[in-house]
Amino acid sequence: MATTLKYGSKRDDKVTGIARKELEKELGRTVVFKKNYLGKPENKKLLNP
């Protein structure tokens, strides 16, 4: 199951990247800024430590 999730995650990243690039091309500007980047949460709980 872990392999399936890993494959799905990589596939989702690829699809998201393509969509972002197409949107940026259409808008003529970038959509990702330091201002709207959330970063890592300070208190992140792990499922399997």
Image: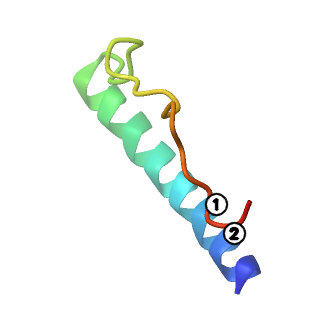
Identify the secondary structure beneath mark 2.
helix
Q: Quadrant of the N terminus?
A: bottom right
Instruction: Give 9 or 49, whichever is nearer the viewer.
Output: 49
Q: Quadrant of the C terminus?
A: bottom right
Q: Which circle marks residue 10 in the picture?
A: 1
| Position of residue 25 measured from the top left corner of the image (x, y, whole percent) | 35, 28
Relative to residue 18, is residue 47 drawn left or right? right
| Position of residue 26 measured from the top left corner of the image (x, y, whole percent) | 26, 30
Colour scheme: rainbow
| Position of residue 39 measured from the top left corner of the image (x, y, whole percent) | 49, 27
Spatial CA span between label 2 and label 1: 6 Å
**Kind of residue at badge 2:** Lys
Count of labels in the image: 2
Q: Name which quarter of the figure residue 9 lies in.
A: bottom right
Q: Nearer the viewer, mark 2 or mark 1?
A: 2
**Kind of residue at badge 1:** Lys
Query: Residue at left 40%, top 23%?
Result: 37
| Position of residue 6 measured from the top left corner of the image (x, y, whole percent) | 69, 69
Query: Residue at left 34%, top 28%?
Result: 24
Instruction: Give 22 or 37, whichever is nearer the viewer.
Output: 37
Query: Residue at left 38%, top 15%?
Result: 33
- Label 1: how many Cα within 10 Å (few below 14, some 14–19, many 20+): few
The answer to whether 45 is drawn above or below residue 35 in the figure is below
Q: Which circle marks residue 6 in the picture?
A: 2
Instruction: Give 14 or 36, whichever is nearer the viewer.
Output: 36
The answer to whether 29 is drawn above or below residue 22 in the figure is above
Q: Are marks 2 and 1 in contact (CB under 8 Å)?
A: yes
